[in-house]
Amino acid sequence: MLTPVSEWLKRSIAPACLLALVSLLDLRPAHAAADSSLWTDIPETGIARTASPRQIVPLAYRSVQLDRNQLATLLAQLPLESDVPATDSDKILSLPLAGGGFSSFRVVEAPVMEPALAAQFPEIRTYLGQGIDDRTATLRFDVTPSGFHAQIISWEGSTYIDPYQPGDLDHYIVYRKRDAQEQGERPRCLVTGQELPKDAPNFQKRNQVVNVSSGTSLRTYRVAIAATGEYTAFHGGNVAGGLAAVTTTLNRVVGIYERELSVRMTLIANNNLIIYTNAGTDPYTNNDGFAMLSENQTNLNAVIGNANFDIGHVVSTGGGGVAGLGVVCSSSQKGRGVTGSPSPVGDPFDVDYVAHEMGHQFGGNHTFNSSNSSCGGGNRNASTAYEVGSGLTIQAYAGICGADNLQSNS
């Protein structure tokens, strides 16, 4: 019997060409070889447009077609991370790269939902992988009713795979972070408490194994992420669609936090109760981040229970983000985190906004050293202003410091 994810994937079979990728330095059994026939390059003229406008249009990208039948077969065989670490998995996934070619990963299923929530929404699944031919590469990907989404982080920077257009489960774009475009003006963040190449390769780390920087213990936090009715409407208008979008975002944030901080967040078992579908009756003021700080804490206490989550957040389509500083696990403050964007999709939202605001909640203050544009108005924090100008990292303000900008995104 097919799982819900397999049923989604097996609805159509895409044309493909066979190309096996085997790491010459890896001595695993021959059956661990990756097969890039999952993916076929396709010109945009060969993609029939849906009625919905495209949500993610990078400056440059590779368009590909996915063979969902083959992917379903692979995913059905994946072990759970709790049984087999990704580094030991003999299941290999080949992914296309933005500049051409493919990269191979050992992959496992790695849930970012508590078991009860995952059982209720079996069509939403998350996975992780470790690079084979590029040992610095780590992978997080998901399969949801909205399609396939992937984030690769390596010495070359970050690469993303997202659906070509809403409602199209067969066609995808592959693009580098440096080519991601924000839709409209970048919202500014508030916290209570000649342009450089964006996301440039770090050649010193090429072919190196990723070093553990935060110890060998994985720290897991229970996260409650609410969604306003407006946010859910953007993602299809139903709980499953809103929850799928939240899961995609969280999976990418976790891909960064695990790699950098040895921190994982897992959606609580009844997170579906705080994915709202009616903007007129939800308990949030969608366009007022400051109002939602207290609204979210109050609502999570009432619906989820204060003892049942470690960090809370709410996503909206309002502009900007705001969060309490160092509030994780604080009984009266841990739900004070808000991220809003008129286009809550893709790297700009997932990383530059949500990962940034959650960083505040975990105690990370602003790191830029500028008072220009959005970097002014009290947003600069003198004791942590380590980065030049707008800064480059997630807790900086890349792209919104006027003349002090070093690059467009973190």
Image (cartoon, grey):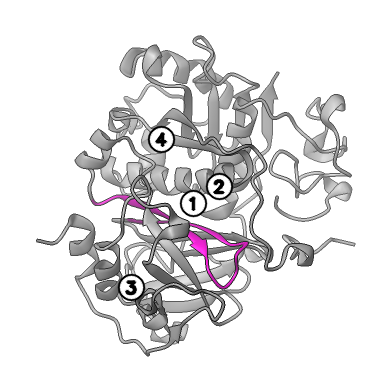
Q: Which residues are magenta?
A: 123-143
- For the residues marked 3 and 2, what is the alpha-carbon distance in whole angstroms? 23 Å
Question: Residue at (83%, 50%) from the top-left corner?
Answer: 405
| Residue contact between numbered discs 2 and 1, judged by CB atoms under 8 Å | yes
The residue singled out by tag 3 in the image is: 170
Q: Quadrant of residue 115?
A: top left
Q: Amino acid at mark 2?
A: Phe
Label 2 neighbour load within 10 Å: few <14, some 14-19, many 20+: many
Question: Residue at (66%, 46%) from the top-left corner?
Answer: 186
- For the residues marked 4 and 3, what is the alpha-carbon distance in whole angstroms? 28 Å
Q: Dot 2: what SS?
A: helix
The N terminus: image quadrant = bottom left
Q: Tell me, for residue 349, which label it has, or none.
A: 2
Q: Is residue 350 visible?
A: yes
Question: Residue at (87%, 44%) from the top-left corner?
Answer: 389
Question: Residue at (31%, 24%) from the top-left corner?
Answer: 281
Q: Dot 1: what SS?
A: loop
The residue singled out by tag 1 in the image is: 345
Q: Amino acid at mark 1?
A: Val
| For discs 3 and 1, the disc positioned in front in the rendered view | 3
| For discs 4 and 3, the disc positioned in front in the rendered view | 4
